[in-house]
Image (cartoon, rainbow, N blue to C red):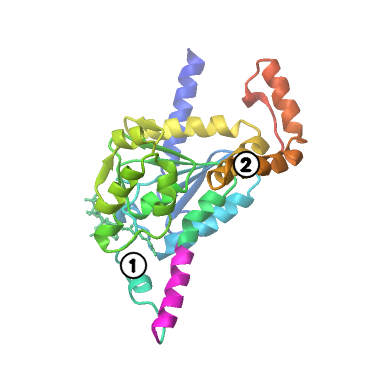
Amino acid sequence: MLSLLLRTFSRQVLIRAMSSSGPTSPYTTLSICRPTPSITHVELHRPEKRNAMNKAFWREMVQCFNEISDDSDCRVVLVSGAGKIFTAGIDLMDMASDVLQPDGDDTARISWNLRRTITKYQETFSVIERCPKPVLVAVHGACVGGGVDLITACDIRLCTQDAWFQVKEVDVGLAADVGTLQRLPKVIGSRSLVNELALTARKMYADEAKSSGLVSRVFPDKDALMAGALEMAEEISARSPVAVQGTKINLIYSRDHSVAEGLDYMALWNMSMLQTNDVMKSAQASMEKKSPKTIEFSKL
Ligand SMILES: CCC/C=C/C=C/C(=O)SCCNC(=O)CCNC(=O)[C@H](O)C(C)(C)COP(=O)(O)OP(=O)(O)OC[C@H]1O[C@@H](n2cnc3c(N)ncnc32)[C@H](O)[C@@H]1OP(=O)(O)O
């Protein structure tokens, strides 16, 4: 009983510590912490502006996820938002100059530069998908515009009961161009629902997000969400990083290829990865009915 109380208390302390008071240097829009040695928590941190995505944010996410990809201590990433909501999407004030007044002497040069800008912004969320470590995202309150682009690049989506999602781009006069139109149809089974959301910009609330498959779990409030997300991250981080990262990479590959191509890629992948010590360690623990948490895996 006492150990259960202590565990609950220390988990609450951990979750509280995850809501930081400000961005982590060198970042100005992100707060980074390590709730456990193998989990990296990335918090969008401009709460007074509802975590609107300004120019610094688009740059910093790329730097942050490139560092996480190379960090052999990190096995799982958890993304969430500080303050009242997850994110209000693109910063409509800060981004106007980049998107609405592109440089260039003529149409060709303006278009050339705009293409480069859009490609650069697409990278902000593609780095999440390319990161070999699984990325969980915990959404509370609103997730608007660019927020939907962000979460569709993540591997596991969780939300609170008060969460809502809005593919808002048509409302601001543009076709979403940084991932939603490409990834959302792969996340949600119904093409009709995707079209409806993207063409009408209507809000989708937590229950529909769950029934449509956009999120896999809904929690009553933000504390419960963060506790649930952390618990899931711990479960994943206890498993072999060779197995976990290979699973993420092959799931994404097979999403974008035929079954035959996916199987070929898998065989090529595992002809090396099956030689890991992790298979023997994991199989032995499984035979002995021990939790994966008892196994020590080398860094990856
Ligand atoms: C090439 C790039 C491609 C990317 C494309 C992406 C496109 C998109 O993301 S389209 C969607 C754009 N977002 C919006 O239209 C949402 C606008 N915001 C809201 O509707 C509300 O703020 C929201 C419902 C999210 C929250 O409402 P709440 O009452 O809680 O907050 P507010 O009082 O409205 O806002 C508080 C302060 O935050 C500032 N703010 C909110 N959203 C944005 C934003 N998107 N951009 C810039 N600033 C934002 C708001 O101005 C308030 O600031 P202040 O007046 O200084 O207190």
Q: Residue at x 75, y 27 (%)?
A: 280
Three-letter amino acid code of the residue under disc 2: Ala
Q: Earlier in the sequence, mark 2 or mark 1?
A: 1
Answer whether labels 2 and 1 touch (C-beta < 8 Å): no
From the top left corner, tell me how far across and down residue 237 is, in percent.
59, 34
Crowd tier of the residue under label 1, counting other residues whose Cα lies within 10 Å: few below 14, some 14–19, many 20 or above:
some
Q: Which mark is residue 16?
A: none
Residue drawn at the location 51% of the way across and 50% of the way down: 128
User: Magenta includes 12?
Assistant: no
- Image quarter for ligand 1: bottom left
Q: Main secondary structure of the magenta part?
A: helix
**Looking at the image, which is closer to me, 74 or 96?**
96
Q: Quadrant of residue 54?
A: bottom left
For residue 96, above or below residue 288: below
Name the kind of residue labelled 1 in the image: Asp
Magenta stretch containing residue 120, yes or no?
Answer: yes
Vertical position of residue 43 compared to residue 172: above or below: above
Give the left or right position of residue 73, taking residue 273 as reference. Answer: left
Query: Residue beneath label 1, please?
Result: 94
**Span shown in magenta:** 106-121
Quarter of the image holding residue 281?
Answer: top right
Count of numbered circles on the image: 2
Q: Secondary structure at mark 1?
A: loop
The location of residue 267, given as percent across then percent down, is 70, 39
Using a 10 Å C-alpha cutoff, classify the residue at mark 2 as few (fewer than 14 neighbours), some (14 to 19) or many (20 or more): few
**Mark 2 within 8 Å of ligand 1, using the beta carbon:** no
Give me the residue at 63% from left, 25% from top: 292
Asked whether mark 1 and ligand 1 are closer than 8 Å, the reply comes as yes
Check disc 2 and report the residue beneath it. 260
Height in image: 27 above or below 135? below
Q: Is residue 57 visible?
A: yes
